[in-house]
Image (tube, rainbow, N blue to C red):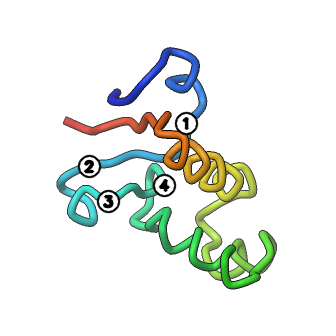
Amino acid sequence: MLGFGLQCMKKLRYIISDPEICHGKPVFKGTRVLVSDVLDLLAAGKDVEEILQEYPQLNEKMVREALEYAAMLVKREHVIEVSA
């Protein structure tokens, strides 16, 4: 794990970064769905149900974690799992 603070290390359960998947951009575990794509949809006004219809491999907790991740980035308190 990379990042700041032990408290944040426990927060991200669904978001990882792997250099072999999508060039290391943050994705949801077990998928190739970019966290940034979900954040873009939220910013465009899509609700969670609409996103889940578009990406059935995700669940509501994953979408909510994308928002938490964005907030952590703004505060510079992000931690994501990096696959070796």
**Could you tell me if the residues under marks 2 and 3 are in contact, i.e. CB atoms within 8 Å?**
no
Q: Secondary structure at mark 3?
A: loop
Amino acid type for the residue under numbered disc 3: Lys
**Location of residue 11 with respect to 71 vertically, above or below:** above
- How far apart are the alpha carbons under marks 2 and 3? 7 Å
Name which residue lies at 66% across and 76% down: 43
Residue 28, numbered label: 4
**Could you tell me if the residues under marks 4 and 1 are in contact, i.e. CB atoms within 8 Å?**
no
Q: Nearer the viewer, mark 2 or mark 3?
A: 3
**Could you tell me if the residues under marks 2 and 1 are in contact, i.e. CB atoms within 8 Å?**
no
Task: Provide residue 9's location: percent of width, then percent of height.
Answer: 50, 24
| Left or right: residue 7 compared with residue 77 | right
First-in-chain label (1 vs 3): 1
Residue 67, quarter of the rendered image: bottom right
Amino acid type for the residue under numbered disc 2: Asp
**Location of residue 11 with respect to 74 vertically, above or below:** above
Residue occupied by mark 2: 18
Residue 25, numbered label: 3
- How far apart are the alpha carbons under marks 3 and 4? 10 Å
Residue 50, quarter of the rendered image: bottom right
